[in-house]
Image (tube, rainbow, N blue to C red):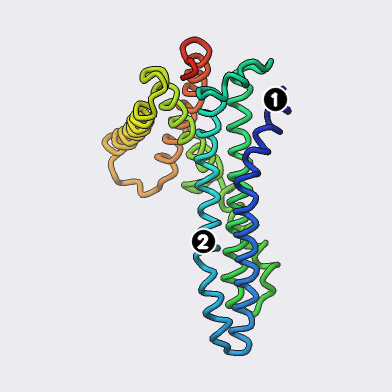
């Protein structure tokens, strides 16, 4: 059933994100061509047309990542707590399977959107050189991920994915509690999401504060604090996921 849930959520994500990814890639390619002609022929028309594409490129690139992040809590609320959940709950699918499918899709689309934004960005900046742009754009993306997979650095791929999932779990937990306490009130949900995010962020800040209080500021490296936050984030993700499933199965109702 995980495969069917994954396909269902995949289609939901694709309807929103594929047009934004196409817009990001298209604006990056057109901007690349415009800048090529503007520098080759010293043509101001091409130059300013490429500048005009900047808001589209950055807006669709950054916007797709933001929409991808927001989509998971939105799909979670629609599928588990809104009126749509009457239909979802009649299906022979466990709650944890459906929530897991939502988060898995969110993670996949986040990586796709991030790579699309990087491709458009690198296509643009490498046009300033005489190098083959597309080849060096792919090389730039590869180097970006190579740096993230360098586990000796202060920030790596595990930290990035943990941070991403941490934010979503905290929002989902606040949404669930707010829906139960406020009996479906949108104001209660918004309030509990705000409180939940601030509470877990505060605890994370306290962990880093205690670390520096004990160790001092003699060590300038960020690897240990980043790893501490990563461990904390993973604990919140696992604990939050379990709490969400328990609350939905035992106490949550549709309002």
Rendered residue at 37%/33% (across/down): 197
For disc 1, the marked residue is 2
Classify 51 as above or below 148.
below
Is residue 183 left or right of 215 when viewed as pictured?
A: right
Looking at the figure, which quarter contains the N terminus?
Answer: top right
Q: Position of residue 170 (x, y in %)?
A: 43, 30
Q: Kindly check if marks 1 and 2 are in contact, taking CB atoms under 8 A apart as contact.
A: no
Rendered residue at 58%/25% (across/down): 99
- Marks 1/2: CA–CA distance: 34 Å
Residue 93 found in image quarter: top right
Rendered residue at 59%/58% (across/down): 118
Is residue 185 left or right of 163 when viewed as pictured?
A: left
Q: Which type of secondary structure does the marked residue at label 1 adopt?
A: helix
For disc 2, the marked residue is 58
Classify 231 as above or below 70.
above
Residue 201 found in image quarter: top left
């Amino acid at each position: 059933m995980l495969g069917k849930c994954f396909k269902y959520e995949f289609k939901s994500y694709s309807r929103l994100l594929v047009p934004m990814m196409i817009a990001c890639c298209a604006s990056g390619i057109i901007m690349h061509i415009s800048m090529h002609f503007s520098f080759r022929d010293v043509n101001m028309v091409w130059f300013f047309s490429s500048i005009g594409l900047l808001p589209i490129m950055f807006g669709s690139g950054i916007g797709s990542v933001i929409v991808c992040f927001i989509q998971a809590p939105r799909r979670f609320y629609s599928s588990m707590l809104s009126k749509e959940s009457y239909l979802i709950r009649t299906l022979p699918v466990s709650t944890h399977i459906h929530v897991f499918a939502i988060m898995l899709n969110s993670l996949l689309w986040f990586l796709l959107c991030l790579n699309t934004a990087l491709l458009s960005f690198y296509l643009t900046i490498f046009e300033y050189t005489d190098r083959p742009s597309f080849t060096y754009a792919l090389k730039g993306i590869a180097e970006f991920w190579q740096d993230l997979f360098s586990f000796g650095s202060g920030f790596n791929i595990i930290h990035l994915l943990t941070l991403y999932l941490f934010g979503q779990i905290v929002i989902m937990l606040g949404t669930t509690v707010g829906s139960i306490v406020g009996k479906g009130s949108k104001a209660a949900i918004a309030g509990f999401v705000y409180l939940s995010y601030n509470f877990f962020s505060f605890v994370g800040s306290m962990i880093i504060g205690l670390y520096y209080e004990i160790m001092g500021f003699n060590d300038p490296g960020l690897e240990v604090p980043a790893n501490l936050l990563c461990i904390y984030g993973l604990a919140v993700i696992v604990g939050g996921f379990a709490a969400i499933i328990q609350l939905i199965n035992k106490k949550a109702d549709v309002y």
